[in-house]
């Protein structure tokens, strides 16, 4: 799936589509043969990626408008996926400052 990226990288931000398998639970009389984990997709800016977790952000603040990160690009709306649930992480395009 690629190498880890540092949070707040200034040179480029990668927009990605993450395809992932979700956990599901039934609390009724549904039998095991009818239970399947759904496959979902999420889109966002790749914040970091390592052997344990893939993190994407739904919001990118290039100018740190809230003053949270000493003026550096700041990511919000973080989705963290356990790497074992991630089926793919595909770049959609690269945005440059």
Image (cartoon, helix red, strand yellow):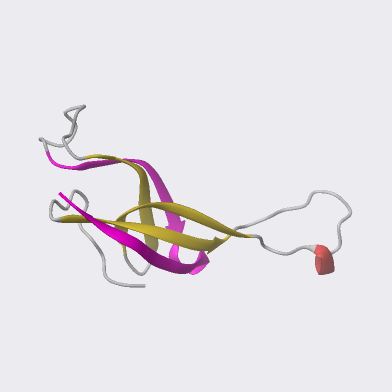
- In which quadrant of the rendered image does the N terminus lie? bottom left
Q: Is residue 23 left or right of residue 19?
A: right
For the stretch drawn in magenta, the main secondary structure is strand
Vertical relation: 97 (above or below) 21: above
Residue 22 place in picture, x, y as percent: 60, 58
Farthest-out residue, top:
66
Q: Exactly how many numbered labels are in the figure?
A: 0
Using the image as rendered, state which of residue 15 and residue 30 is in the foreground. Answer: 15
Using the image as rendered, state which of residue 50 and residue 41 is in the foreground. Answer: 41
Q: Is residue 96 left or right of residue 49?
A: left
State the image quarter where residue 91 is shown: bottom left
Vertical relation: 4 (above or below) 78: below
Q: Is residue 75 left or right of residue 26?
A: left
State the image quarter where residue 46 is shown: bottom left
Vertical relation: 65 (above or below) 85: above
Farthest-out residue, right:
29
Residue 56 place in picture, x, y as percent: 37, 52
Q: Residue at x 62, y 57 (%)?
A: 23
Residue 46 in magenta? no
Q: Residue at x 40, y 67 (%)?
A: 90
Residue 19 place in picture, x, y as percent: 51, 63
Residue 75 place in picture, x, y as percent: 28, 42
State the image quarter where residue 36 is shown: bottom right
Farthest-out residue, left:
70
Q: Is residue 34 left or right of residue 57?
A: right
Q: Residue at x 48, y 53 (%)?
A: 42
Q: Residue at x 37, y 59 (%)?
A: 16
Residue 90 in magenta? yes
Q: Which residues are magenta?
A: 72-97
Vertical relation: 13 (above or below) 67: below
């Amino acid at each position: 799936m690629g190498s880890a990226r540092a949070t707040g990288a200034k040179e480029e931000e990668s927009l990605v589509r993450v395809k992932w398998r979700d956990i599901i639970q039934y609390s009724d009389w549904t039998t095991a043969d009818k239970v399947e984990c759904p496959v979902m997709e999420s889109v966002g800016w790749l914040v970091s990626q390592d052997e344990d977790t893939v993190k994407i952000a739904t919001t990118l603040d290039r100018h740190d408008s809230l003053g949270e990160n000493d003026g550096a690009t700041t990511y919000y709306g973080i989705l963290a996926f356990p790497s074992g649930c991630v089926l793919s992480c595909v770049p959609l395009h690269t945005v440059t400052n």
